[in-house]
Image: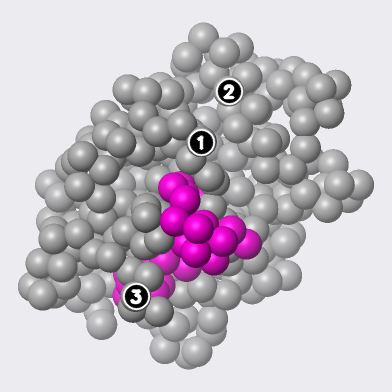
Amino acid sequence: MEKYLSFSQEVIEAKEKGLAIVALESTIISHGMPYPQNVQTAREVEQIIRDKGAVPATIALIDGKIKIGLTDEELEMFGNARDVAKASRRDLAFLLSTKKLGATTVAATMIAAELAGIELFVTGGIGGVHRGAEHTMDISADLEELAQTNVAVVCAGAKSILDLGLTLEYLETKGVPVVGFGTDKLPAFYTRESKFNVNFQINTAREVADMMRAKWELGLQGGAVIANPIPEEDALDANFINGIIEQALKEADEKGIQGKEVTPFLLGKVKELTEGKSLEANIALVKNNAKIGAEIAIALNKNK
């Protein structure tokens, strides 16, 4: 396993000093945002984590290695690269053995983080059960990963293009706790809340760390969703964004877009129809998640 991992100097030094480390995905760089906002956001998110006293580890597949922490040059290369594969659990072995560039999704980032001994991961929103999944069986591998991989995931809930009710049902079946950070409602990515309740409301980083430590010490496999709402000033109006999502879903259906192409198409369409407001919201919520994630990582690190 070690032969597939490559740690950046910053992460090596963090491990030697016993500092808290926060995993970050690379799909948001290659598939989630356009250049140059993708690279700029990645750098700003990393800096937020450093400013909080933790160490960022952006994860990606480069030249047959799982890179745990990217250099500035690697970030820039990734932000500009074409034909970067979207890597989930299914794809890791193939992409590593063929030495192709791969951007890690939530699922793959969780796997890599656990392999690297990192207990917390910050992202924008998790994948979930797609609308119409009762016909298509389109369910994100992120949910299965949350059930089996011991990494806490700080996010702004699930992407609102999904069926949030079925996503929560699936997570319940798999025994994955969905925690609202300072909220009793599930955030819906662009908006602070949905009509669905979380399992538990927790208000401090220390309490989240205590819960995760108890879970893992009990031998209860899997992570948890730490749902942190987008800041109020950056949230989009629920009626506005939901109307646009319905329009984007209709267009995806008419064009026969399926499988892993659905999410990038929908997010791109939503960005276009909101005239860029969704991208601004996306950037704001990721930065907010980085602040909270760094605090929880530090609390987890003290609680080993």
Rendered location of residue 290, percent (x, y): 30, 47
Crowd band around label 2 with a 10 angstrom C-alpha radius: few (<14), some (14–19), many (20+)? some
Residue that mark 1 sits on: 83
Rendered image: mark on residue 232: none
Q: Residue furthest front?
A: 98
SS class, disc 3: helix
State which quarter of the image contains the C terminus: bottom left
Which segment is the magenta one? 90-119
Q: Earlier in the sequence, mark 1 or mark 3?
A: 3
Checking the image for residue 3, the label placed there is 3
Tell me what residue is drawn at x 61 percent, y 48 percent.
127
- Residue at image location 10% in from the left, 67% down from the top: 13
116 or 155, nearer to the observer? 116
Residue type at mark 3 is Lys
Residue 65 place in picture, x, y as percent: 37, 62
Q: Is residue 191 left or right of residue 175?
A: left
**Residue 6 vertical placement versus 159 (above, below):** below
Indicate the colouring scheme: one colour
Percent of width and height locating residue 19: 15, 68
Which of disc 2 and disc 1 is earlier in sequence? 1
